Amino acid sequence: MPWSKLKQDEIAVRRTALLKLRRQGIRYDDERILNLGYNSAATARSDLKRALEAHRDEEAAEVSIYRQQENERLDALLEAAWPAATTAKPIRNKEGDVVGEEIDMRAVDTVLRLMDRRAKLNGLDMPARTELSGPDGGAVPLGSGSLAELHTLISLNPSEPETAGGDSDR
């Protein structure tokens, strides 16, 4: 059975006080926290966890609503720009004769930027893979080495070895 509004308000007030005390660095087993109505430090800890999870759920719902609104706006903009980006228009010479057709490249650029924005908003792009490689594209050598060897490996121009003390003119 759902809790009454009064009980929900009491819980919200208690959790707010708990959060305030925890932000001040007060330990869960401190008397000030236990006096909020918690039987033990473990129940206070659990209640704080529930409060944070509830907040996270509310936050996720708000993000979902925002994302939906942004997608609808992008849909409207894309709908407006799409015909100009995909329909060829006649090119006329000085006499007014049609000599060819072309699409509006600014509209194409706009459509591509809208599509890129949608991909970022919805997390559609794959993360970029990066790889660290050693000399000549091989494996990065691991093991013990001198500081000068380390500097040589990470320098921009490996053909110019650095001094052992790490001093360079760069």
Image: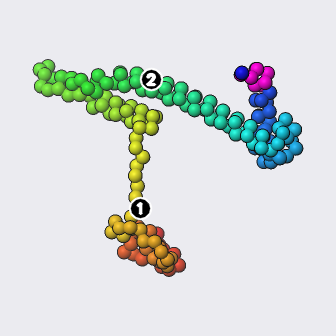
Q: Is residue 19 above or below residue 145?
A: above
- Which SS class for mark 2? helix
Q: Of helix, strand and loop, which mostly describes the magenta segment?
A: helix
Residue 85: image location, x then y, percent? 28, 27
Q: Is residue 98 above or below residue 167?
A: above
Residue at the spot 14% in from the left edge and 19% down from the top edge? 96
Badge 1: how crowded within 10 Å, few (<14), some, or many (20+)?
Answer: few
Residue at the spot 42% in from the left edge and 32% down from the top edge? 118
Q: Is residue 40 above or below residue 110?
A: below
Q: Amino acid at mark 1?
A: Leu
What residue would you read off at disc 1?
A: 132
Total numbered circles: 2
Give residue 72's mark.
2
Q: Which residues are magenta?
A: 2-9
Quarter of image, res 74: top left
Residue 121: image location, x then y, percent? 46, 34
Residue at the spot 48% in from the left edge and 78% down from the top edge? 145
Towards the viewer: 69 or 55: 55
Q: Amino acid at mark 2?
A: Glu
Towards the viewer: 52 or 152: 52
